[in-house]
Image (spheres, rainbow, N blue to C red):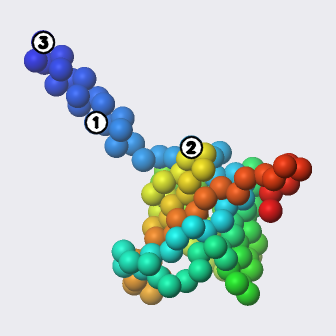
Amino acid sequence: MKYLFSLLLTAFLIISCNNNPNPSLIIGKWRGAAWHVAGIPAGRDARNVHFSFDDKGHYTYSYEDLHEAGKYKIEKDMLFTKLPRENEMMVKIVTLNSDSLVFDMSRSGTDETLFLIREKPDSTGRVP
């Protein structure tokens, strides 16, 4: 009985530690909710961050006056983005579910975390 309990506990831990998100969950529009640098609020207005991912591997990103459009792919818990004629960039997906997306990234050696929420359609079915 002790062996069976240990076996079940080990299997549960292995399954619960699997952090490979379902890539199809990223499809849609996302808006920033919080932005932390080195674990503390960054002082940036995360509500100005917008991402959109489609089912064909294309994404758009905007933050204030910065706008990007390129291709993306997900491998395990990593999101890779590539702009035309630019190097591929990577961020770690910490959380990806039906309404939350959290990225860990490093900019110039500084750890940053970006928290996003899925934009919900309004009463007409359009996403703002």
Q: Is residue 12 left or right of 19 when viewed as pictured?
A: left
Q: Is residue 100 left or right of 7 when viewed as pictured?
A: right
Residue 83 shows up from this direction: no
Q: Amino acid at mark 2?
A: Asn
> In the image, residue 31 lies at what x, y percent?
66, 65
Q: Specify the quadrant of the image occupied by residue 98.
A: top right
Residue 9 shows up from this direction: yes
Residue on which the image places disc 2:
22
Q: Is residue 11 above or below residue 122?
A: above
Q: Amino acid at mark 3?
A: Met
Q: Are marks 3 and 1 in contact (CB under 8 Å)?
A: no
Q: Residues within 10 Å of mark 2 (few under 14, many from 20)?
A: few
> What residue is at 47 percent from the left and 82 percent from the top?
42
Q: Specify the quadrant of the image occupied by residue 87.
A: bottom right
Query: Between disc 3 and disc 2, whose residue precedes?
Result: 3
Residue on which the image places disc 1:
13
Residue on which the image places disc 3:
1
- Secondary structure at badge 1 equals helix
Q: Nearer the viewer, residue 90 or 66?
A: 66
Q: Residues within 10 Å of mark 3 (few under 14, many from 20)?
A: few
The residue lying furthest to the right in this view is 124
Q: Is residue 115 above or below residue 36?
A: above
> What residue is at 16 percent from the left and 25 percent from the top?
6
Q: Is residue 128 above or below residue 113?
A: above
Q: Amino acid at mark 1?
A: Leu
Q: Specify the quadrant of the image occupied by residue 59.
A: bottom right
> In the image, residue 100 lies at what x, y percent?
56, 54
Mark drawn on residue 43: none
Q: Nearer the viewer, residue 25 or 42?
A: 42
